[in-house]
């Protein structure tokens, strides 16, 4: 049973800027492919991301109370895409197409959106760290 037609379906918002499109991403993040090693490198990078987040979450949480939630978005996204790599032999299912102009689209899934939001919010944590460092220097 196909939930999304092969040609895609409009969400009826933003003047066709966002559409539902069935797509299996057999490449890495941002469409980067490494040939036969793409999946292996993806597993290593996604696993390393999760392990790094587990390692630094407590320390960053002591500096910025938002940090665990922000890191949770990124870790959850990494875990979701890692799971998809193991479950779907034809690639990670992406389905949200965002028109970027010139006839080009970026196709992503909800895990990708969570990762992008988390990475943007890390700027907040970086700002909190910089403010604390400045406060210590000015003492």
Image (cartoon, rainbow, N blue to C red):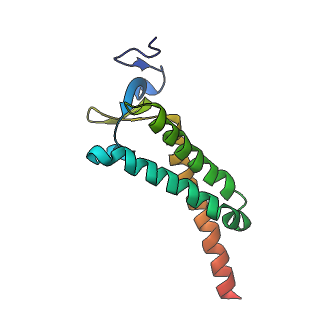
**Residue 125 quadrant:** bottom right
Whether residue 33 is visible to the viewer of this picture, yes or no, is no
Picture layout, residue 102 above or below residue 49: above
- Residue at image location 34% in from the left, 41% down from the top: 27
| In this picture, residue 67 sits left or right of residue 2 | right
In the image, residue 59 sits, relative to residue 101, either above or below, namely below
Which quadrant is the C terminus positioned in?
bottom right
Residue 66, picture quadrant: bottom right
Residue 100 visible somewhere in the drawing? yes
- At which x and y percent is residue 92? 43, 34
Quadrant in the rendering for residue 9: top left
User: Residue 47, percent across and down?
Assistant: 51, 52
**48 over 6 or under it: above or below:** below
Please state the total of marks drawn on the protein image. Answer: 0
Indicate the position of residue 68 as horizontal and vertical percent values.
Answer: 68, 55
Q: Nearer the viewer, residue 10 or 107?
A: 107
> Which residue: 55% across, 44% down?
79
Q: In the figure, is residue 27 to the left or right of 135?
A: left
Front one among 28 and 61: 28
> Is the residue 124 above or below the residue 77 in the image?
below
Residue drawn at point x = 46 percent, y = 27 percent: 14
Residue 107 point in image, percent of width and height:
39, 34
């Amino acid at each position: 049973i196909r939930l999304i037609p092969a040609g895609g379906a409009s969400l009826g918002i933003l003047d066709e800027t966002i559409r539902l499109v069935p797509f299996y991403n057999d490449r890495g993040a941002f469409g980067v492919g490494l040939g036969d090693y793409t999946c292996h490198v993806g597993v290593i990078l996604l696993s390393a991301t999760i392990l790094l987040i587990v390692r630094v979450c407590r320390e960053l949480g002591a500096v910025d109370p938002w940090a665990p939630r922000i890191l949770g978005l990124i870790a959850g996204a990494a875990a979701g895409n890692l799971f998809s790599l193991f479950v779907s032999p034809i690639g990670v299912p992406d389905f949200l197409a965002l028109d970027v102009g010139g006839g080009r689209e970026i196709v992503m899934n909800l895990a990708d959106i969570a990762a992008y939001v988390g990475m943007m919010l890390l700027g907040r944590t970086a700002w909190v760290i910089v403010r604390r460092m400045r406060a210590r220097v000015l003492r």
